Image (cartoon, grey):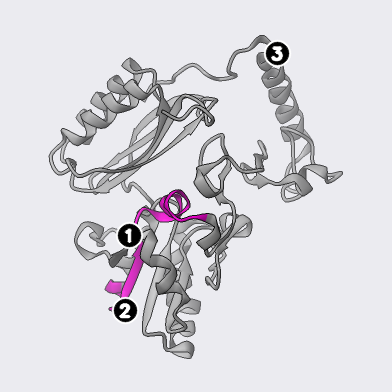
């Protein structure tokens, strides 16, 4: 077991497979997480499961065993990492309409998704000039890291991706006439849904990175990598690099966006209160509230406890 990265196991997972009794699954998984000392977020929808959880290895294994025991989930794919500090403040297991919200209810990614491309084959695919590479993540994610040559839709939300493709994306394809499209995201879930969407829009030769950026950073040597920068992750690690080593970013507690070393050096950055991005979008009342929250966090840190660390209900 790795020791340099700590003894907290992080598991990022998703699977598109129908779930009939979502409430029963939610309750069972919440109980399994709570029993194993596991925190994080799991989303349960009719279309499947999605989430990232962290905790002791035995607790993580117990939760994954419970998920794999569900009908259609025996082949659940999981991406692992290690960290020294618990990256989540609480446990949330929630029923949702979609496990990743795109607003396209007629899609069936389990049946319609594009061709999987392994991390070891990804470089050759995206280095081909006849391949159009599309990043399906949001603008702030693409700002801190991306694959060479990727188109950045600069969407604020994954819900915006269909509109982007139907306007700018479609126009770009008509202009460049690529032989194929290659799409990627953090862990694979958004590109499964977006490749299904492109196929529903009539685009046939669509590929996506199996396991997402996280698997690529884990399996591809940095010397051979076409990835540039860091990958934003939705937990307290904030970003990771090759080998899934924690990156240099922290999180602005006001806008929840990543801040690098230069951003923290800005005169407009106030820990826990605002950053360069959001300094003009918060009023005095909000700033006072954020400052008090930061004060409480620092008090908790000095006491050696997690602020807001108690697990919440579902």
The residues tagged by marks 2 and 3 sit, at their Cα atoms, a distance apart of 55 Å
For the point 47% across and 32% down, the residue is 82
According to the image, label 2 marks what residue? Answer: 203
Q: Is residue 210 magenta?
A: yes
- In the rendered image, the quadrant that contains the N terminus is top left
According to the image, label 1 marks what residue? Answer: 192
Q: Count the numbered circles shown.
A: 3
Could you say which is closer to the camera, residue 90 or residue 232?
232
According to the image, label 3 marks what residue? Answer: 302
Q: Is residue 40 magenta?
A: no
Q: Quadrant of residue 95?
A: top left
Residue 251 visible at all: yes
SS category of the residue bearing label 1: helix
Q: Nearer the N terminus, badge 2 or badge 3? A: 2
The residues tagged by marks 3 and 1 sit, at their Cα atoms, a distance apart of 43 Å
The residues tagged by marks 2 and 1 sit, at their Cα atoms, a distance apart of 14 Å
Could you say which is closer to the camera, residue 122 or residue 254?
122
Mark 1 Cα shell of 10 Å, populated few (<14), some (14-19), many (≥20): many
Residue 301, which numbered label? Answer: none
- Please give the range of residues in magenta: 199-221
Mark 2 Cα shell of 10 Å, populated few (<14), some (14-19), many (≥20): some
| Extreme residue in the right direction | 267
Q: Nearer the N terminus, badge 2 or badge 1? A: 1
Residue depth check, mark 2 versus mark 3: number of the one nearer the observer: 3
- In the rendered image, the quadrant that contains the C terminus is top left
Q: Quadrant of residue 119?
A: bottom left
Residue 40 visible at all: no
For the point 50% across and 45% down, the residue is 243
Mark 3 Cα shell of 10 Å, populated few (<14), some (14-19), many (≥20): few
SS category of the residue bearing label 3: helix
| Extreme residue in the left direction | 71
For the point 28% across and 21% down, the residue is 32
């Amino acid at each position: 077991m790795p020791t340099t990265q700590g003894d907290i196991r992080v598991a990022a997972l998703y699977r598109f497979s129908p779930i009939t009794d979502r409430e029963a699954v939610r309750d069972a998984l919440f109980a399994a997480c709570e029993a194993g000392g596991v925190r994080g977020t799991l989303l349960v929808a009719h279309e499947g499961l999605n989430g990232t959880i962290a905790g002791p290895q035995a607790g993580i294994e117990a939760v994954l065993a419970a998920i794999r025991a569900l009908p259609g989930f025996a082949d659940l794919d999981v991406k692992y990492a290690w960290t020294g500090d618990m990256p989540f403040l609480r446990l949330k297991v929630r029923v949702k309409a979609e496990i990743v919200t795109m607003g396209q209810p007629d899609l069936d990614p389990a049946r319609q998704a594009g061709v999987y491309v392994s991390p070891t084959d990804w470089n050759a695919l995206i280095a081909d000039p006849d391949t159009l590479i599309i990043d399906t993540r949001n603008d702030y994610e693409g700002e801190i890291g991306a694959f060479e040559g990727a188109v950045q839709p600069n969407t604020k939300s994954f819900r915006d991706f269909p509109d982007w493709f139907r306007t700018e994306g479609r126009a770009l394809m008509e202009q460049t006439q690529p032989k194929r499209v290659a799409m990627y995201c953090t862990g694979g879930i958004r590109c499964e849904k977006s490749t299904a969407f492109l196929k529903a829009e009539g685009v046939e030769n669509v590929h996506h990175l199996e396991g997402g950026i996280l698997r690529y950073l884990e399996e591809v040597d940095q010397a051979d990598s076409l990835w540039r920068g860091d990958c934003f992750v939705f937990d307290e690690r904030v970003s990771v690099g090759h080998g899934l080593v924690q990156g240099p970013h922290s999180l602005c507690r006001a806008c929840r966006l990543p801040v690098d070393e230069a951003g923290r050096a800005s005169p407009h950055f106030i820990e826990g209160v605002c950053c360069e991005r959001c300094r003009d979008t918060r009023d005095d009342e909000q700033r006072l509230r954020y400052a008090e929250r930061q004060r409480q966090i620092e008090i908790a840190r000095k006491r050696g406890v997690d602020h807001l660390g108690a697990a919440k209900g579902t």
